[in-house]
Amino acid sequence: MNELIELIQKLKLEKHISELDEAATKQAYILRILQYLGWNIFDVSEVIPEYSVGTRKVDYALACNSVKKVFIEVKRVGEDLENHQEQLLSYSFQEGVKLAVLTNGITWWFYLPLNEGSWEQRKFYTIEITDQEPKEIAERFVDFLDKENVRTGKAIEHAESVIKSKKRENAINETMPKAWNKLINEEDELLIELLAETTEKMCGYKPDVKTVVAFVKENLSGASHVEDRRSKSRKPVRSGGNVKGTEKEYTFKSISHIRFNHERYSVKSWKEMLLTICGVLYRSHKKEFTKVFALVGRKRPYFSKNPNELRSPEEIGDSGIYVETNLSANSIVRLAYDIISLFNYTERDLVIETNQG
């Protein structure tokens, strides 16, 4: 493990990364890492180069006892990996390979090809060598690609554990606001009594039920969603004063479409709206997209290259930049207007259509 950590530390410091072609990437990164993970890179029956799948080839197939366990597809540094994931996963599915990796040497995307769902949903983990801590990177490489773990099936167990953990976290994040809203809307007796008793303990006077219910409903927009981490003291990164779109109330409203920069997009959730806007801006402004790092919340950033800094991170395309999605509808709308203003769009360029008008 220590040797692998040292190798990753050295790779992080290499400055000629962007100059490497695909062949050099394989030699400089992929084979060196596989060797430290216990694979005999000189045994072509174990680390099989240019493995044929029909009329096409996969860069490497890792085999144990002649059984193909892992497919690895390598692209040059800087290439858009998203354009190649469908092809890799199709090959893996065709050959019954349970674990697949798509990498440019710096970014490593790990997949369970035989699982259900879209290509993106089958991706269970991402390693970014230049951004993440070497020890954490080494641990994940061992979990998913160590020869012994692959041979015994523990690599798949580790991968399934990651997916299960993500599903649990996502389910909680999506359900908790709904559960809170349910308690509020149904005027849960225990919640009302708890608030009344706490008020009494703090001031000596106990409010009646009618007063508590009225207070809860008046403060519903701020209480019924995940905490809005925007700092009120931070200057918004936009010009022209308050944006009209952020003055509206979106709590309890479901979104159907957005119109941005003369294009109309169908979106099923506020989270999807945020990801759509970020994706469109990233594709149009790749060279300057790092401007989004200027937008920060009170306790956490809204954008980061390290997903561990966010509560519910979602990667924006293949940018290596993650956006926080664990936000209320109102927070997402405010953030969306802040984001587009960074790229010189105005509030008139973004129109939000809800099912409630």
Image (tube, rainbow, N blue to C red):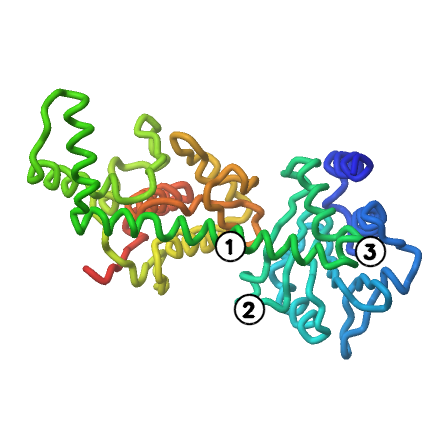
Q: Are marks 3 and 1 in contact (CB under 8 Å)?
A: no
Q: Residue at x 24, y 38 (%)?
A: 242
Residue 2, percent from left and from top:
79, 35
Other-residue count near label 1 (Cα within 10 Å), few / some / many at <14 / 14–19 / ≥20: some
Residue extending farthest to the top is 203
Q: Which residue is mark 1?
A: 283
Q: Which residue is denoted by mark 3 in the rendering?
A: 23
Mark closer to the chain start, 2 or 1: 2
Separation (CA) of disc 3 from disc 1: 27 Å
Question: Which class describes the residues within 10 Å of circle 3: few (<14), some (14-19), or many (20+)?
Answer: few
User: Which label sits in the foreground, 3 or 1?
Assistant: 3
Residue 155 position, x and y percent, is 70, 55
Residue at the far right in the pictured view: 42
Placement of the N terminus among the 4 image quadrants: top right
- Who's the residue at 28% across and 51% down the image? 348
Q: Could you tell me the amino acid type at mark 2? A: Glu
Closest to the camera, between mark 2 and mark 1, is: 2
Q: Could you tell me the amino acid type at mark 3?
A: Ala
For disc 2, the marked residue is 116
Question: What amino acid is at disc 1?
Answer: Arg
Answer whether residue 296 is visible to the viewer in this image: yes
**224 and 164: which is toward the camera:** 164
- Disc 3 is placed on an element classified as helix
Disc nearer the start of the sequence (2/3)? 3
Q: Quadrant of residue 119?
A: bottom right
Quarter holding the C terminus is bottom left
Mark 1 residue element: helix
